[in-house]
Image (spheres, helix red, strand yellow):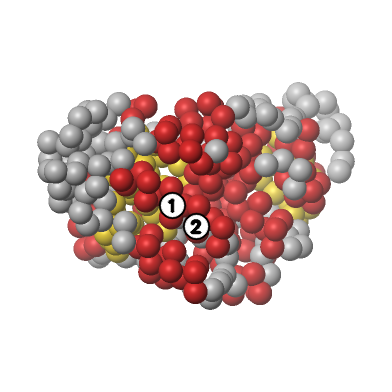
Amino acid sequence: MSGPPADGSGAAPAALTARAPHVPADRLVAEMVPPPRFQGARFDTYLPDPNQASQAEAVQVLSAFAAGIDGGGGPARRRWFAKSPRKPAAPKGPRGVYLDGGYGVGKTHLLASLWHATPAPPERKAFGTFVELTNLVGALGFQQTIRTLGDHRLLCIDEFELDDPGDTVLVSTLLGKLVDSGVALAATSNTLPGKLGEGRFAAADFLREIQGLSAHFRPLRIDGEDYRHRGLPEAPAPYDTETVIRTAHRTPGASLDDFPALLEHLSKVHPSRYGAMCDGIRAVCLTDVQAVPDQSTALRLVVLADRLYDREIPVLTSGKAFDELFSDEMLRGGYRKKYFRAISRLTALARDAAPLAAG
């Protein structure tokens, strides 16, 4: 990588490869709120596509769901789904709603809106990605996670994914315990509950666990095209390396890393720390972007892309374009939905970075 601009402008940028933060468990719990990108998300700021009736319907259904969640600590006064008066901790039927749809139809916006609309204090509501939820269990332990989340009124799980049978059993058991405690559930995914895991594993016990998860949710289909592509230009092409380096040095709060070195560094940092690794970063500049070499590396990059997107951190690159990150084999495989999501989100962040390069 080249050095700073010859004119010496700008302070030396940070390096993500120099960061390996320790994240205490209590921070993981405290940060289970909608990410900065969606702090202002509300049902009335969601703009349904007039050509997709399911989007407006989703707003109505979720608004009713939020209104039906009891915000206090006692028995629910009113529930959207039926609940037995004799066994308040064991409601009948599904206790959650499952938003199914493609990339960029606004599922996370709706999920965050539900979190904000639910009449309960922030400490009685939790919002996190599927990966963050499994990381929380890893940090606290299973029983402590149940105790921590069991007094919540709502748990929102964004980008619900099942990548291995172990996670399937873990999350299925966890959600069952939380439902028994009266916690309402809401989740987003790109796959219907009964189809989770399709194309990945065929073990009978895996499919049995999927069926159990499916029973916890009422599926709500949301149709539409990726809003990030509606009427927007294609993502800008990668820049030359000198432009990326120059932009990093003149942009306050920017980081500058060699992409292959960053991928290597990610293998040494637990994904639960990727968010903290981005603390204080205002722009990410990457040189020599290449296709990721293997599946494990690709999945770590997906997590980093999610954290950057949540924090609205623009990404400026040289090398290959983002649609060349993942091989055709990866894009046809069981994790293809994650990879397409990462491409979509990184593309949006590349658009956000264009003014930095032009400045």
Residue found at x 55% / y 38%: 141
Find residue 41 and report its horizontal and vertical position in percent: 34, 39
Residue 36: image x %, image y %? 46, 34
Q: Amino acid at mark 1?
A: Thr
Residue hosting label 1: 173
For label 1, the SS is helix
Q: Is residue 287 left or right of residue 299?
A: right
Does the image show residue 20? yes
The amino acid on which the numbered mark 2 sits, given as a three-letter code, is Val
Q: Is residue 281 left or right of residue 185?
A: right
Secondary structure of the residue carrying tag 2 is helix
Q: Is 131 situated left or right of 74 in this image?
A: right
User: In the image shown, does 214 or 280 lie closer to the viewer?
Assistant: 214
Check the picture and name the quadrant holding the C terminus.
top right
Q: Residue furthest front?
A: 86
Residue at 62%, 63% (x, y): give it.
323
Residue 36 appears in the rendering: no
Residue 61 x/y as whole percent? 20, 52
Q: Which residue is disc 2 drawn over?
A: 169
Q: Position of residue 71 (x, y in %)?
A: 23, 31
- Say if mark 1 contacts mark 2, CB within 8 Å: yes
